[in-house]
Image: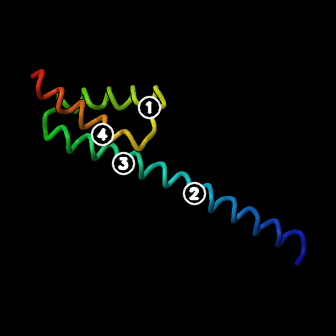
Amino acid sequence: MDVTSIFIIVVATVLAIVFKVILYKKIQKWMDQDLIKGLADGNSDKQAFLQQEYQKLIAQKVKRKQYSDRLTELADQFEQNS
């Protein structure tokens, strides 16, 4: 194999890995948004509240595994306060 072939293989491999990482992150965001919409149950005020809290969780660097539990708790609190 010559240098050009090796370069093409390396570039294609790196691009494939980057694509997978970007796609994985996008799917995670879609799942989080779907969770928020499900918890809001059509209530636009509740959805806006959960969206704000979701942004706070991201800013606080809370582990992603805890998003579901925290958002569910916040949705319940919102219902109790309403």
Q: Amino acid at mark 3?
A: Trp
**Residue 60 rendering spot, x and y as whole percentages:** 46, 26
**Residue 55 rendering spot, x and y as whole percentages:** 39, 29
Q: State the residue at coordinates (18%, 27%).
A: 77
**Residue 29 rendering spot, x and y as whole percentages:** 40, 45
**Residue tagged 4:** 69
The answer for how far apart the CA atoms under marks 3 and 2 are is 16 Å
Mark number displayed over residue 6: none
Circles 1 and 2, Cβ within 8 Å, touching? The answer is: no
Count of marks overlaid on the render: 4
The answer for how far apart the CA atoms under marks 3 and 1 are is 14 Å
How packed mark 4 is, by other alpha carbons closer than 10 Å (few <14, some 14-19, many 20 or more), is few
The answer for how far apart the CA atoms under marks 4 and 1 are is 14 Å
Q: Along the line of sight, which residue is nearer the eye, 65 or 11?
A: 65
Looking at the image, tell me whether mark 3 or mark 2 is earlier in sequence order.
2
**Residue tagged 1:** 58
**Residue tagged 2:** 19
Q: Amino acid at mark 4?
A: Asp
Looking at the image, tell me whether mark 4 or mark 2 is earlier in sequence order.
2
